[in-house]
Amino acid sequence: MSKAAKTIAKIAGKARIDAALVLGSGLSAIGGLLEDCITIPYSELKGFPGSGVSGHGRDLLIGQMGNKRLAILTGREHYYEHGNAAAMRPALEALADLGAETLMLTNSAGSVDERFRPGDLMLIADHINYAGMNPLIGEPTDRRFVNMVDCYNADLRGKAKAVGDRLGIPLGEGVYLWYSGPSFETVAEIQMAIRLGANAVGMSTAPEVILGRYLGMKVWACSSVTNMGAGLSSENISHEHTKTMAVQGAEKLKRLIPALVEEL
Ligand code: HPA
């Protein structure tokens, strides 16, 4: 068990964690859904992300969501912060050590598909690792050769869609293309993403999916669309805009996630 996992168990108790949830830009309000919540600042946990990005939290929350015990990472470290694609590895390893069998990921993304408008959610069915970085570079064991077919768990996707139907939250599926950031895309890069078969673009998530599969977790991921990609609309793309628009997606995720967690 990692040092961070031992610290978490000491503070929050040894009871098994059922699932881990990572919150994307502007989505930290979802953390408020936990009951009997224990907050542990990342700074107390060895290997957890450092200073962070505005709009992201810096705490690990452990608590109950319905009948499940959840660990919520209120913020992530992105590749663009320090050039480390494996930045989330210690945090995800610690939660896997504590029993988490399911990894749920959220992010804010730019849509390159008219089906997904700002304020909509897009269930990620697959990704394109266009950043070309991989969190398993340097991993010396044969476990590094992770099979990425069906890496976005089909059963969880199906359950999420059923829950979305029940709650009146449309959940179309799409392909997420990972650009490193931190600059937003050029108009030409968005046109390329469309030609490559992407439906949304963003600066996170794909490395965590690889890590989650490496750790043997079932992975589920959902984008909250904050804007149309560069050149696809007249709106000005900025981090401020992302954080403002993320509120709409957060409201939907706040209803969707507890109902999905119930079904895990
Ligand atoms: N591009 C990349 N990442 C993003 C975007 C975008 O347009 N919007 C929110 N995150």
Image (tube, rainbow, N blue to C red):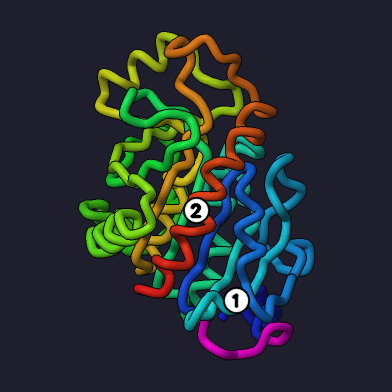
Q: In the rendered structure, find residue 2 and report the number of the disc placed on it.
A: 1
Instruction: Confirm whether the magenta stretch covers residue 11.
Output: yes
Graded by Cα atoms within 10 Å as few (under 14), some (14 to 19) or many (20 or more), the crowding at tag 1 reads some
Instruction: Confirm whether the magenta stretch covers residue 193.
Output: no
Which amino acid type is marked by label 1?
A: Ser
> Where does residue 2 sit, x and y in percent of width and height?
60, 76
Q: Earlier in the sequence, mark 2 or mark 1?
A: 1
Disc nearest the viewer among 2 and 1: 2
Graded by Cα atoms within 10 Å as few (under 14), some (14 to 19) or many (20 or more), the crowding at tag 2 reads many
Residue at (24% x, 59% y) in the render: 158
In depth, the one of 218 and 227 nearer the eye is 227
Evaluate whether residue 138 shows in this view.
no
Most common secondary structure along the magenta stretch: loop
> Where does residue 113 sit, x and y in percent of width and height?
33, 25
Extent of the magenta region: 10-17
Q: In the rendered structure, find residue 62 and report the number of the disc placed on it.
A: none
Residue at (34% x, 45% y) in the render: 170
In depth, the one of 223 and 178 nearer the eye is 223
SS at circle 2: helix
